Image (cartoon, rainbow, N blue to C red):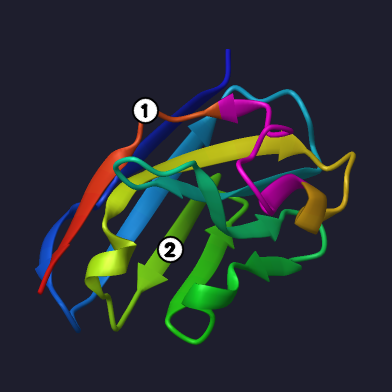
């Protein structure tokens, strides 16, 4: 059974930073794409950033480029999201998700993540103005 456990959410003032972590276990596929999605109140879920386990290729949503950095430790099966220069529009529940790398990383990560295989329960990030 695939398990994804997120941590690191919380309340931060605008301009501040947070680091999210996701610990993954139980996935049967060796080559995968893992990443972060978010859903703000009243809005659809959207892909924030993903990384490929084999190539290290990354995807970032345009609005987070230059502010967020995704990194992974394949040996520990963890993926982190360093979020800097946060603004209130980043407020959302952030979910970790994983899928076998059968599709292009942009296909998997862009949009609502309908092609992702397994999901964590999410961690809330609140950015105050």
Magenta stretch: includes residue 129: no
Viewer-closest of 75 and 9: 9
Disc 1 is placed on an element classified as loop
Q: Which residue is painted at 45% across and 75% down in the image?
A: 68
Q: Are marks 2 and 1 in contact (CB under 8 Å)?
A: no
Viewer-closest of 40 and 50: 40
Q: In this view, does 47 lie above or below 121?
A: below
From the top left corner, tell me how far across and down residue 19 is, in percent. 30, 64
Q: Is residue 114 above or below residue 124?
A: above
Q: Which residue is painted at 34% across and 40% down in the image?
A: 42
Could you tell whether 122 is left or right of 107 in the image? Answer: left
- Tell me, for residue 37, which label it has, or none: none
Circle 2: is it few (<14), some (14-19), or many (20+) Cα within 10 Å? many
Circle 1: is it few (<14), some (14-19), or many (20+) Cα within 10 Å? few
Magenta stretch: includes residue 117: yes
Q: In this view, does 129 lie above or below 96?
A: below
Disc 2 is placed on an element classified as strand
Q: Is residue 12 above or below residue 24?
A: below
Magenta portion: prevailing SS class: loop
Q: Which residue is painted at 89% across and 39% down in the image?
A: 102
From the top left corner, tell me how far across and down residue 52 is, in percent. 74, 56
Q: Quadrant of the N terminus?
A: top right
Dot 2 or dot 1, earlier in sequence:
2
From the top left corner, tell me how far across and down residue 94 is, in percent. 37, 46
Q: Quadrant of residue 88?
A: bottom left
From the top left corner, tell me how far across and down residue 2 is, in percent. 57, 20
- Bounds of the magenta segment: 108-118
What is the distance, in whole Å, between disc 2 and disc 1 at their CAs?
16 Å
Q: In which quarter of the image is residue 41?
A: top left
- The residue identified by callout 2 is 81
Could you tell whether 40 is left or right of 11 in the image? Answer: right
- The residue identified by callout 1 is 121
């Amino acid at each position: 059974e695939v398990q994804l456990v997120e941590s690191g959410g919380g309340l931060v003032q605008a301009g501040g930073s947070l680091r999210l972590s996701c610990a993954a276990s139980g996935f049967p596929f060796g080559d995968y794409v893992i990443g972060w999605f978010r859903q703000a109140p009243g809005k659809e879920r959207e892909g924030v950033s993903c990384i490929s386990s084999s190539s290290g290729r990354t995807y970032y949503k345009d609005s987070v480029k230059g502010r967020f950095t995704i990194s992974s430790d394949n040996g520990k099966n963890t993926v982190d999201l360093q979020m800097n220069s946060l603004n209130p529009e980043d407020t959302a529940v952030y979910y970790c998700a994983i899928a076998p790398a059968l599709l292009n990383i942009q296909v998997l990560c862009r949009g609502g993540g309908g092609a992702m295989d397994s999901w964590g329960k999410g961690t809330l990030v609140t950015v105050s103005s």
